[in-house]
Image (cartoon, rainbow, N blue to C red):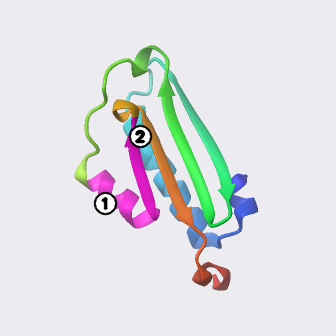
Amino acid sequence: AAARRWQPGEVGVEQVQLAVGEAAAILAPEPDGDGTLTLTFAVEQDGLRVDLGLTGPGSAADRAPVPPIAGAVLDAAVDRWHVLDGGRRFVLHKRLSDTDDDE
């Protein structure tokens, strides 16, 4: 819903969805694992920020590094992304560019 209010155009919304799905799959790779995956969307002046975090029993150990193919997907989908807290948190940034208004 936050991505729709942000109104970056259909391509921008699809890119955010792709990046969120990719980051979520890295954070919570096991469907029956323990823990809670939280997502926070923040519409900022220049775009959208998405914060994904894994908390609870399944988040205690440091996560594996981001696989190269996943990094390439994130690079293509958002403008900036960071892995924090030993791999238990992702922050994604998608700017609203001038070209998004034309989509």
Question: Which amino acid type corresponds to the residue marked 1 in the rendered image?
Answer: Ala
Q: Which residue is mark 2?
A: 25
Q: Position of residue 34 (x, y in %)?
A: 46, 17
In the visual, does 47 lie left or right of 22?
right
Q: Is residue 72 above or below residue 33?
A: below
Q: Which residue is mark 1?
A: 72
- Which residue does the image show at 32% across and 52% down from the upper left? 70
Q: Nearer the viewer, residue 14 or 81?
A: 81
Question: Which amino acid type corresponds to the residue marked 2 in the rendered image?
Answer: Ala
- Which residue does the image show at 47% across and 54% down from the upper left? 19
Badge 1 marks a residue whose secondary structure is helix
Q: Quadrant of residue 71?
A: bottom left
- The segment highlighted magenta reads 69-84
Badge 2 marks a residue whose secondary structure is helix
Badge 2 or badge 1: first in the primary sequence: 2
- Which residue does the image show at 45% across and 42% down from the upper left? 90
Pointer 1 local density, CA inside 10 Å: few below 14, some 14–19, many at least 20: few
